[in-house]
Every structure is written in structure tokens, then in C-alpha cells.
Amino acid sequence: MINRELIRIKIVQLTYAYYQNGNRNMDNAEKELLFSLAKAYDLYNYLLALIVSVTQEERHRVEIAANRATREGTEAPSQRFAYNKFAVQLEENKQLNLFMENQKRRWEDDMEAVRKLCDQIEQSTIYKEYMASEDDSYDVDREVWRKIYRTLIQENPDLDAVLEERSLYWNDDKEVVDTFVIKTIKRFDPENKADQELLPEYRDEEDREFAVKLFRATILNADVYQRYMSEASRNWDFSRLAYMDVVIMQIAIAEMLTFPNIPVTVTINEYVDLAKLYSTPRSGGYINGMLDTIARHLIQTGMMMKTMPEPRPRHPHNERQDNRATRREGRRPTIAQTSAQRVANRQQQDSEQAVEE
């Protein structure tokens, strides 16, 4: 489940935190990285467990409504959603149940959030159309949960607030983890019953090694990589770069030099996307140009044995746009900065507690 997109995001956050934290201990930082990635896998299982908790709450509601109907002699409520075939299979899933047995946190501790989500589901068009449909196939049951997840769980500020309160990592992880939950829903097969496989924590050992090697290369070779950046920014004062831009480029250079099988263009595109998401409005274009220049220099000097396509013609430089972007810098911290700052604060608190003990 933990793919390289998530790994890159975590390394950006943890590298920023490493430099923010005065106690720069490489071993502790590496443990924090792996812990942070493990928390993303916890979130994946916890969100699957949310489907089970909603189903159990719906079952409880149906039972109450059925008892009332018996007393009053009215029509009994439909049990269709409460016993949705996909949700029942997930409820019985051995892998999910084994995982949840070892977790201290459960959705039972946040039943107010579960009940609120149930209310939102029952009021939705998706739910009403499902309950009115005569097609009671497994495919329809699975599809309704995919739609519910995408519509009411994937973008749910109330739920996001609950998750962030549970773990400081989860709010930043949820966007990526949501895609894996939806993928898991689509993969479910009724023939597999309780033995349906969930996504593994890592696709293979290579991805875990990728995380550790990239993080270590980023930190241990920082001076060399920053020298490349300084040399490539001859027409720009290197000290004026947004600090997050420096972090992102440092990691990108580490990836280019450490992993010979990853094409240069793939690496550049990945980190340009991260810059657009996590840094300043002008960062994407600037980092793209800087990394392109650095990569070509490394290839020409024989320090990197990779190939790159011929450079594209450059567009005229818009100085006014640069000035506007510069004024926007520093107005408010980016998502990655606030997340990384929370990690740095957590590390500092742990260190202080250890000293007190």
C-alpha cells in the first residue's frame, strides 16, 4: 500500500522536520520516517474499519426500528444496507480483524462521528437509490460503498478533524490513503469470503529500502547537493530560495544519483508536483528549471550515468510574475511545513521527556 508517492511526501516532511529540530540524530530521524509510514498503513486499516462500524451502527438502528414496528404493527424496515454483502464480507475479513485486535484506538471511541456519518449516508441520493433498487447483487452492494466512500468519506471535514485528533500524521496522509481504500473496495471478490487479501504495508522490500536509502542520501550528502543547487542558480541569490524549495530539490538530486533505474524525467516530474502542492506558487516552474540544469550537468560531467531528452525552447522570462510570486511567499505556512513542524515538535517533546525521566 505504501507506494513511492507517499514515501516521497513523507521524506519531504521528515527532511524539513530534521532541519527544524535542533537535535539532528540520523538514527532517530530514520526511525521517525518508518514510524510515519507505518502510521499511514494504520490509517488504511482504520478507514476500512470505519465501513464496518457504520454497518454495525446501521444494524443497531434497524433493530430498534424493527422492534418499534412490531410494537406498533407497522411495516418492518429494510435490512438491505445493514446487511450489505460487501460490508459483511469486510466485517468478517480475517486480516482486518487481526489488525484491529492489536489496536488501542477503535471507532467505538468516536461513535458520535460514526452516527453523524450514518445520518449523512441515509440522507444521500446514493443511499436512497440503492434502497429503492431491486438489484440485490454483490456487485451493486460493493459499488454503493465505493460511491459512499468517494462522496461522503473522501471529502469530509468532520471526519478529517477526528482523524487529525487521533494522529498528527493522518490528516496529511488521508488524501493518498483514500485512493488505496477505494482500490481495495473494488478488489473485493465474494468468492474469497473472509480470506480476501487486503493491500500489504509495502508492495515489496524494495520500496522500504527505497525510503531508507533516499532519506539517508538526502541528509548525509546535503552539502554536496546544495552546492549543485548554488552553482545552478547563478542568476539567482541562492539564499533567497524558499526553504521548502531547497529541501525538495535536495531530495530530488539524492534520488537521481542514488537510484540508477529511475529515469531523470520521472524524478523531476515527481518533485515538481510536490513543489506545486507544498511550496510557493512559483516553485514548480523554478524547481523544474533548476533540476533540469543540475541533471544535465551531472550527466555531462560523468557523475550520473543517465540520459535525458533534448531541452525544450525556453519561453520569455516574466519578471513581473516572479515579483508577484515573491510577495506571496511567507504569507502562511504550507501543508508540508505545518505537518513537518508538528513532527519536529513531537520529536522535541519526546527528547525533553526522556531527559526528565
Image (cartoon, rainbow, N blue to C red):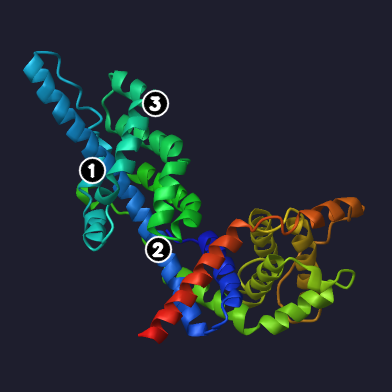
Indicate the quadrant containing the N terminus: top left, top right, bottom left or bottom right: bottom left
Of the numbered discs 2 and 3, the one sitting upstream in the chain is 2
Circle 3 residues within 10 Å: few <14, some 14–19, many ≥20: some
Q: Residue at x 30, y 37 (%)?
A: 115
The mark closer to the camera, 1 or 2, is 2
* SS under mark 3: loop
Circle 2 residues within 10 Å: few <14, some 14–19, many ≥20: some
When asked about the image quadrant of residue 312, the answer is: bottom right
Q: Which mark is residue 124?
A: 3
| Type of the residue with mark 3 | Ser
| Type of the residue with mark 1 | Gln
In this view of the protein, which residue sits in the foreground, 295 or 46? 46
Tell me the residue that label 2 is attached to. Answer: 39
Q: Residue at x 30, y 48 (%)?
A: 110
| Alpha carbon separation for disc pair 2 and 3 | 31 Å
When asked about the image quadrant of residue 300, the answer is: bottom right
* SS under mark 2: helix
Of the numbered discs 1 and 3, the one sitting upstream in the chain is 1
Residue 158 locus on image (x, y percent)? 43, 42
The mark closer to the camera, 1 or 3, is 3
Side (left or right) of 108 relative to 244: left
| Type of the residue with mark 2 | Lys
Tell me the residue that label 1 is attached to. Answer: 89
Residue 322 locus on image (x, y percent)? 85, 55
Side (left or right) of 74 relative to 152: left
Residue 86 locus on image (x, y percent)? 27, 38
Residue 73 locus on image (x, y percent)? 8, 13
